[in-house]
Image (spheres, grey):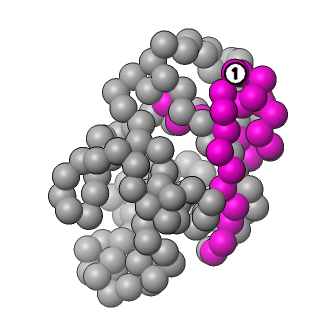
Amino acid sequence: MHSIDGLAVLEGDEYRQKGGGNFARWQQHITDWHRNLYGGLERAPSIGEGEHLIVSAVGPEPLIEMGLTPEQMWAVALEKCPENRWLAKLDSSTSLGLDALPKGVHLYAPMTAQLTSHGGTVPQTQAYNHA
């Protein structure tokens, strides 16, 4: 998940010149490819070491039942499916087995620290969320 300033970023020359939208190097690892642009959050939550992002496409209820506080996003561009998603940050003190996840709820671990356009790492930053 990436936080960007809007759809114009994905349609811009700079994005394409830097390899944006081209996943040839990663294609063998991509098993469920979708592109969506979501609004509703200023920025995607910053997920630190030992933390996870939990995402529901079936409503906020599964996350609430896990004792989490979900935030809603809604599709504004690209595939627009699923139309809504709910996010919550799962901190390192919460243990959750993968078998416990309901259908339509997914758990993600960060690949790197959250990057910014200024070349640094910073917690939470953005207007649209590209998933």
Please, what secondary structure does the residue beneath circle 1 have?
Answer: loop
The magenta-colored residue range is 52-77
Q: Is residue 101 shown above or below 81?
A: above
Residue 30: % across, % down:
49, 51
Q: Is residue 49 left or right of residue 74?
A: left
Q: Residue at x 49, y 23 (%)?
A: 91
* Number of callouts: 1
Q: Residue furthest bottom?
A: 13
Q: Is there any visible trace of residue 50 in the rendered image?
A: yes
User: In the figure, residue 23 lies in which quadrant?
Assistant: bottom left
| Nearer to us in this view, 19 or 96 | 96
Q: Residue at x 68, y 50 (%)?
A: 72
Residue hosting label 1:
67
Q: Is residue 35 left or right of residue 48?
A: right
Residue 74: % across, % down:
69, 61
Amino acid, disc 1: Gly
Q: Residue at x 61, y 64 (%)?
A: 39
Q: Is there any visible trace of residue 130 in the rendered image?
A: no
Q: Is residue 21 shown above or below 54?
A: below
Sort mark 1 into few (<14), some (14-19) or many (20+) by Cα contacts within 10 Å. Answer: few
Residue 79: % across, % down:
67, 70
| Nearer to us in this view, 86 or 107 | 86
Q: Residue at x 39, y 56 (%)?
A: 125
Does the magenta portion include 54?
yes
Residue 105: % across, % down:
70, 36
Q: Residue furthest left?
A: 119
Locate the C terminus and report the quarter of the image it occupies. bottom right
Does the magenta portion include 39?
no
